[in-house]
Amino acid sequence: MNGSRIVAIGHYQPARVLTNDDLAAMVDTSDEWIRSRVGIRTRRIAGPDEPVDELAAHAAAKALAAAGLTPDEIDLVLVATSTAIDRSPNTAARVAARLGIPGPAALDVNVVCAGFTHALATADHTLRAGAATRALVIGADKMSDVTDWTDRSTCVLVGDGAGAAVVTACPPGAEPGIGPVLWGSVPEMGHAVRIEGTPPRFAQEGQSVYRWATTRLPAIARQACEKAGVAPEELAGVVLHQANLRIIEPLAQKLGAVHAVVARDVTESGNTSAASIPLAFSKLLEQGALRSGDPVLLFGFGGNLSYAGQVVRCP
């Protein structure tokens, strides 16, 4: 019951870079139009031979190496994704098979853009209950698989990638490194972000999402800080779901995290759904923008309209 902590994190992105100029050759758009509306310059796109479980496994392998752990030391694999093509085996089982993890509990978590923070909370609760000791928590999405590349309102947004965290139970007497989660949803607005149909296609009501995110979410994010006993001005970092720069910047400002580094990975990675938070968090750590022990707010929001956030300590 001592809580849990993140001991390592890693990320992975495909090699192919798709620029705004590339998109302008595909649909009626321009670099200026995209930057002014969503702040995105580039995004990474996986190839047809790179399934979402492969993206997830690459990120997880990096996190495991950084933690100094071997696959046989992991007993729980959670993958947040909404772009798995197959229903079974699930993505978590396929990741475990790729990495050679013997006999873990393997679960997929589909909360779209808020998936990683939901999965992280689930891992924390599981470790607190003693049902696991070491977990791999992964956010991975291949949004290019569910995108209509003739629809300029959505195709300019998306990217592919994965991020992963190794989460372990805290030793006796140690302070928890993952704060209490604040989560919820607005089911009556679930239609505002969708991946539906055959074949499945991503669609959203952009103005509705923008208004909801910029008006409702700042107060909810502050409540996540309160649950952790950390004031917004004490945060060293803020990693929001990387949906749109015009959502990220106002939300961070209204939160009042005046001293925090704010992740803006959306500019180079696009919206990678469940991958966006661990991907952006991993990059900030890799760049040295955050230090071990720093308090960071992770806050996911989007599909269903669901949200989940918690304050974590950097590994």
Image (cartoon, grey):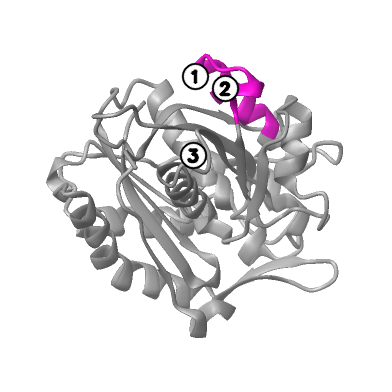
| Mark before the other along the chain sequence, 2 or 3 | 2
Please report the bounds of the magenta region as a residue range.
Answer: 57-74
Tell me the amino acid under the disc marked 2: Leu
Secondary structure category for the residue under label 2: helix
Left or right: where 175 falls relative to 111: left
Residue at the spot of label 2:
64
Q: Residue 195 location in percent, x, y?
A: 69, 68
Image quadrant containing the N terminus: top left
Position of 10 relative to 51 (above/below): above
Magenta residues, dominant SS class: helix
Residue at the spot of label 1:
67
- The residue mark sitting in front, 1 or 3, is 1
* Tag 2 near tag 1, CB within 8 Å: yes
Label 2 and label 1: CA atoms lie apart by 5 Å
Residue in front for this viewpoint, 40 or 278: 278
Residue at the spot of label 3:
278
Residue 245 visible to the viewer: yes
